Amino acid sequence: MPQQTLDLKRIRERLLQERARMTAELERIQDRSSESQLDETGELSAYDNDVGDLGTNTFEREKDMTMEQTLQDMIEQVDAALLKIDRGTYGICDQCNNPIAPARLEAIPYASLCISCQASSEGA
């Protein structure tokens, strides 16, 4: 998509807001994870080390680790989109070099693939 048809200033601002939101969420999860590990391993725990509690804590920790990785990946995608704006290639599919539909970029401003290439990459 030709860059002049996109409001890059608005898109950049939206990407920066998304990045800040994702970073804050990532930090919140990391803080919660650190506190949870201290509770499980330290004397400061207010809970008995019941097998059920440990299983629940393990599940929550694994869920947080998955969410951390997802957020880190999304932050990298946002950073890549910001770099593409700087380089003048924002809105161009990384795979086929065709324009990404404006509606897709409105929904997912850090999208790097057009709908067709995204579907192909997901095996659809």
Image (cartoon, helix red, strand yellow):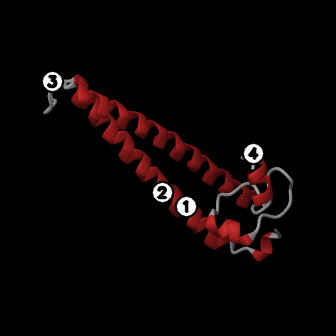
Return the mark for residue 84.
Answer: none
Circles 2 and 3, Cβ within 8 Å, touching? The answer is: no
Find residue 77 and report its horizontal and vertical position in percent: 63, 50
User: Which residue has dot 4 on it?
Assistant: 123
Q: Nearer the viewer, residue 117 or 82?
A: 117
Q: Nearer the viewer, residue 53 or 20?
A: 53
| Mark 3 vs mark 4, CA separation in Å | 49 Å
| Mark 4 vs mark 1, CA separation in Å | 31 Å
Circle nearer the viewer, 1 or 3: 3
Q: Which residue: 79% across, 70% down? A: 3
Q: Which residue: 75% across, 50% down? A: 124
Closer to the chain start, of discs 1 and 3, is: 1
User: Which residue has dot 2 on it?
Assistant: 20
Circle nearer the viewer, 4 or 1: 4
Return the mark for residue 43.
Answer: 3
Query: What is the quadrant of the N terminus in the image?
Result: bottom right
Q: Which corner quadrant of the image does residue 60 belong to?
A: top left
Closer to the chain start, of discs 2 and 3, is: 2
User: Which residue has dot 1 on it?
Assistant: 16
Q: Amino acid at mark 2?
A: Ala
Q: From what the image shows, is residue 90 above or below residue 55? A: below
Mark 3 lies on a secondary structure that is: loop
Find residue 80 and report its horizontal and vertical position in percent: 67, 51
Q: Amino acid at mark 3?
A: Glu
Report crowding for label 1: few under 14, some 14 to 19, many 20 or more residues within 10 A (C-alpha): some
Circles 4 and 1, Cβ within 8 Å, touching? The answer is: no
Q: From what the image shows, is residue 6 above or below residue 61? A: below
Q: Which corner quadrant of the image does residue 108 belong to?
A: bottom right
7 left or right, relative to 40: right
